[in-house]
Amino acid sequence: MTEPQTQNGEALVQVQNVKKYFPIRKGVLSREVARVHAVDDVTLSVAEGETLGLVGESGCGKSTLGRCIVRLLEPTDGEIVFDGRSIGKLGARKLRPLRREMQMIFQDPYASLNPRKRVGTIISDPMRIHGIGDRKERKQKVEDLLRTVGLSPEHYNRFPHEFSGGQRQRIGVARALALRPKLIVADEPVSALDVSIQAQMVNLLEELQDEFRLTYLFIAHDLGVVRHVSDRIAVMYLGKLVELSPAEELYSRPIMPYTEALLSAVPVPDPDLAEKRERIVLEGDVPSPINPPSGCRFHPRCRYATEICSQVEPPLVDYGNGHLAACHHPLNVDKETLSRVQASAAHTPEAADSSALPQDPGKERAQPVPRPD
Amino acid sequence: MAQQLLEVNGLKVRFATEDGTVHAVDGVDFELERGKVLGIVGESGSGKSVTAMTLLGLTRDKNTRFEGEVLYKDENLLELPESRLRDVRGAQIAMIFQDPMTSLNPVYTVGDQIIEAITTHEPTGKKEARRRAVELLRQVGIPNAQSRVDDYPHQFSGGMRQRAMIAMALSCNPDILIADEPTTALDVTIQAQILELLDRLRADFDSAVILITHDLGVVAEVADEIVVMYAGRIVERGSKRDIFYDPQHPYTWGLLGSIPRLDRPKPKKLHSIEGTPPSLINLPQGCKFRPRCPHAFEKCFEEPELKNRVDAKGHLDRCWLSVDDKRGVRGSTIAGEERVVA
């Protein structure tokens, strides 16, 4: 069970026990005094042609993981396999030819385009750098790309400031497509856009996926948008992968209480429903990844947390159908499944043995633990 | 019973620029009552922020032209001299901005900034002001307020900074709190916290809140009345129930349809409003939404008035389609289905 999550197709990206720590240095000698545990032992894979949604709050390490995968960052530990090649430790020169195959779309359409360059240059630069075509061919290609992303070829000689946020994001997409990559890591591609433009962008990304057979890693904090694009969704909290599930199942049957809380935080555009439903408002902020809480990292904010949660880190458990979660008090799981579950081998933290597996709580569902106010 | 706090009549704001006159706000009217939340919804460039900033006189400039009136306590804020306006601003009408990173001064502690807001408007001593600053931070849910009051903004997280902004805005017990996209830069979980906070503060402080956002989901949670703006004008206005359960303007339908919803089965494609908002220098003739509207017909080359067309009192819209026609065609759009080409 080394790659239990791949549903169909071959894994294009395999992330195995990847860790990324950022050192904090102080003093004259720049001695390392602490580490930010941005990504802490994450294992997952992205199948060819699928969209994996990666969700979590700011500071959960989702962007860091995305950047490690396209090797804008070097992982501290662990293995990243892209298209059969291990790329986790490759040097800059060896990475270069691979860069054609993985591209990134950034969150901020204002900061990610060079304001002094014309749109044509921005989009054709990746081709020039990789020595594709001559000047004329490149121009032709750029014009095609502009059409593909819903802009017009006349925009070739304009500057980024002449475009609206949504149009700029389209330029970013055209640039990412210029080298015909296999994988696109989209880091919050729509969160800076208006709701009505968000929908255009999401639809465009889906069309392009069909047309160019792209594989997406779609990073976002908004579970509403992610649902539309993703085949599977991974939820991260404080550097850890806490739940991984087929997209629809995550919404109908969240297992990890953190996922439940994330779902309930999405505003419902229906006043009656909004009034009726129970809203779980998570207290406080995400704790510091420099000094993450012991045991389950979510326990200080979790309403189901008990003794064990603060002591033993829950292993990632396979609940069947490719649905994994790491929790001592899983939600929406019946007794039968619970008795069958096993820790997924690759994810068991060293400290946890079988006693860390979620036990039958004696009730069908985890109950919120009453807390003294 | 309800006390009217603010009345905006025929507000127009124009900016003279090198490229031409920008009609940022073009005829906006609304009233605001004590203890109520008014949601102003629209895309970027719809004039919602300019409207809010104009209420506080923040758009005054030699290239700006105003028309209409903003009545607050029998005074027209548009004509108030700057020195008088300064007493209103911050003390009686306060504002929180979208970006909590740039709206706090990085070289002063959070406490200093709140204390300054208090002592500017009220004859309080420094000590008393500090005590109140701590109390305010506690009220908006900053843990450990006593010690965090001496922190610099960079030591706060995004959500905490927005809370600090709210604390500062509330420091003088304002009658009106204007929140301009207060949650757009925040995570959904923090957004839920801030919305809950705004809702609680409205009850505790009995202020009126103007909540500006592009996300109808956000106003569904807290607003009482909703104004939908497009290209500098109000295209629809009504109670929250009117807007969500009987929306009359195709733009409102589009906005409702383009929200990805978790309470419904996933549609094949997300609904989107085609095209982009018009340039405010060169507005289209007639109804400003016509070029993007799938239901437009000849009559739309004349601009419709904002008036009551349905039974519900106070529910106004700006659309030529008959009410029956609208009820017939809007269903699929609101459900977020792909556009049916007529």
Image (spheres, coloured by chain):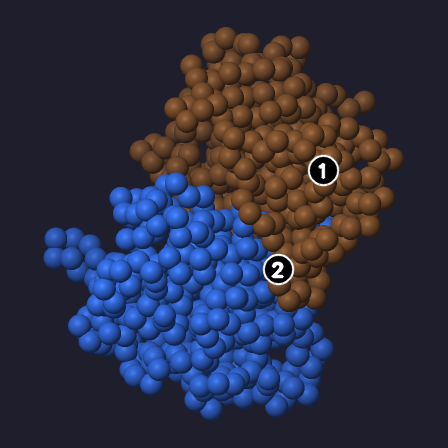
Relative to residue A242, is residue A145 depicted above or below? Answer: above
Q: Position of residue A107 (x, y in %)?
A: 41, 54
Give the amino acid at mark 2.
Leu
Residue A301: mark: none
Chain assigned blue: A
Crowding at label 2, few (<14), some or many (≥20) Cα neighbours within 10 Å? many
Looking at the picture, tell me which residue is in the foreground, A263 or A190.
A190
- Secondary-structure class at tag 2: loop
Residue picked out by circle 2: B270
Asked if badges 2 and 1 are on one and the same chain, I answer yes
**Quarter of image, res A334:** bottom right
Residue B131 position within the rendered picture, expressed as x and y whole percent measured from the top left:
48, 29
Q: Which chain is brown?
A: B
Q: Quadrant of the N terminus of chain B?
A: top right
Q: Mark 1 falls within which chain?
A: B
Horizontal relation, residue B220 to residue A149: left or right: right
Q: Residue at x 72, y 30 (%)?
A: B304
Q: Chain of mark 2?
A: B
